[in-house]
Image: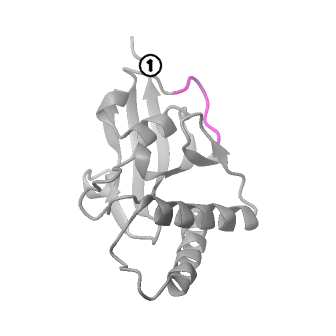
Amino acid sequence: MSKTVAIFLGILSILFVSSCLDNVNDNPNSRNPEKEMRELNEALASLIADGWDIDTTEMGIYYIVHKEGEGPLVGEGDSLSLEYKGYLLGGLVFDASSLHYDDEIWDFVFISSELIPGFADGLSLMNKGAIIDMIIPSQYAYGEKGNGPIEPYTTILFTAKLHDLKPAS
């Protein structure tokens, strides 16, 4: 988890500096695809400069593997025990399994159509014991409408640890 904290602190510092350099006449609350892409590219460049190995799924989800798991990868209908935390690029936690479950683990049956596409795509890379970070552009998350504290055109990040996977029978 300390690696994850370091990643997000790096992203936070890049975004702080870039926000100071934005045009003074820009409305700080106005989000658009160009602003999101600028923030995303700056965050990715910062992570790469810090030596992180970032991979990309076919869908376009960026991810960092902190620990390889073992066994089969997550598939439709599998029963999962997942610990996760969702962040905005600025570091705000908008969701976490610890906010919903006393043991901090979400037990559920994986049905990709019930999750945001980027989160489902990232989970499909995992197997039992895997720990990854996912960087999900808004087009695979909450898009132009946003959701709660997630403004429109906002890239989100998830840390995820798959404690258990029981394949569908």
> Residue at 45% of width from left, 89% of height from top?
24
Instruction: Left or right? Give the position of 40 relative to 81.
Output: right
Report how many numbered discs are placed on residues in the image: 1
Q: Image quarter for residue 164?
A: top left
Q: Image quarter for residue 50?
A: bottom right
Q: Nearer the viewer, residue 47 or 19?
A: 19
Residue 168 position within the rendered picture, expressed as x and y whole percent measured from the top left = 40, 16
**Secondary structure character of the magenta stretch overall:** loop
> Residue at 54% of width from left, 36% of height from top?
59
Instruction: Name the amino acid type tagged 1.
Output: Pro
Magenta stretch bounds = 67-73
Q: Quadrant of the C terminus?
A: top left
Coloured how?
Answer: one colour
Residue 91 position within the rendered picture, expressed as x and y whole percent measured from the top left = 45, 70
In this view, 77 is above or below 129: above
The residue indicated by pointer 1 is: 167
Residue 49 position within the rendered picture, expressed as x and y whole percent measured from the top left = 75, 67
